Amino acid sequence: MDLWSSLWNVVVVFFWAFVFLAALVAFFTIAADLIRDRSLGGWAKAAWILLLVVLPLLGSLIYLIARGDSMAERAAVEQRQAKAAADDYIRSVAGHSLAEEIARAMQLRDAGAITEEEFLQIKRHALASS
């Protein structure tokens, strides 16, 4: 075997590895979209999965042509929901706002629970952390 044929064999192996990985990504992306879709019934989802398993390239192309727009819409809705959930979580763990923290310290000072120096220290800390 000469250098060019062995080099060509390496190129062919990489090409088929790429095709295989691309088919796996397409299959799992479409399968995830099928699971996420609430408008399809169980039998329709099973038929799509069967088509994807038996004829992966043709099934993927048909799915993308027939349902590609709604696939993008479902992905966008899921992304917005995930962002809203993340924002809610961040707000819940972030604590109080700067104004709330200073107002709470003022209430403690007015009630006599802390001194004026402690209030100023809390205020400086709150302003420095913002």
Image: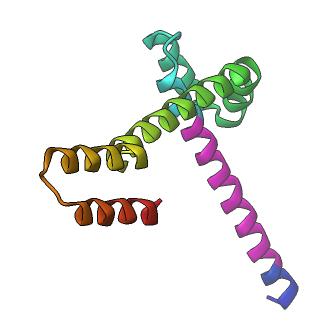
In this rendered view, identify the residue nearer to me: 11 or 37.
Answer: 37
| Farthest-out residue, left | 113
- When the figure is inspected, residue 44 is found, relative to residue 128, above or below; the finding is above
The residue that appears at 49% across and 25% down in the rendered structure is: 36
Tell which of 87 and 129 is nearer to you.
Answer: 129
One can see residue 22 in this view: yes
In the image, what residue occupies the spot 46% across and 11% down? 43
- Observer-nearest of 45 and 73: 73
Taking 103 as reference, is 71 left or right? right
Residue 91 horizontal/vertical position (percent): 40, 42
Give residue 56's position: percent from left, percent from top.
64, 35
Residue 29 placement: quadrant: top right
Q: Is residue 97 above or below residue 75?
A: below
**Residue 117 percent across, percent down from the top left:** 25, 66
Q: Does the magenta-highlighted stretch encompass residue 25? A: yes
Closest to the observer, 70 or 93 = 93
Colour option used: rainbow
- Disc tally is 0
Segment tinted magenta in the rendering: 8-29
Looking at the image, residue 119 sits to the left or right of residue 3; the answer is left
Residue 86 sits inside the magenta stretch: no
- Can you give x and y, in whole percent of width and height, for residue 75 in the image? 60, 30
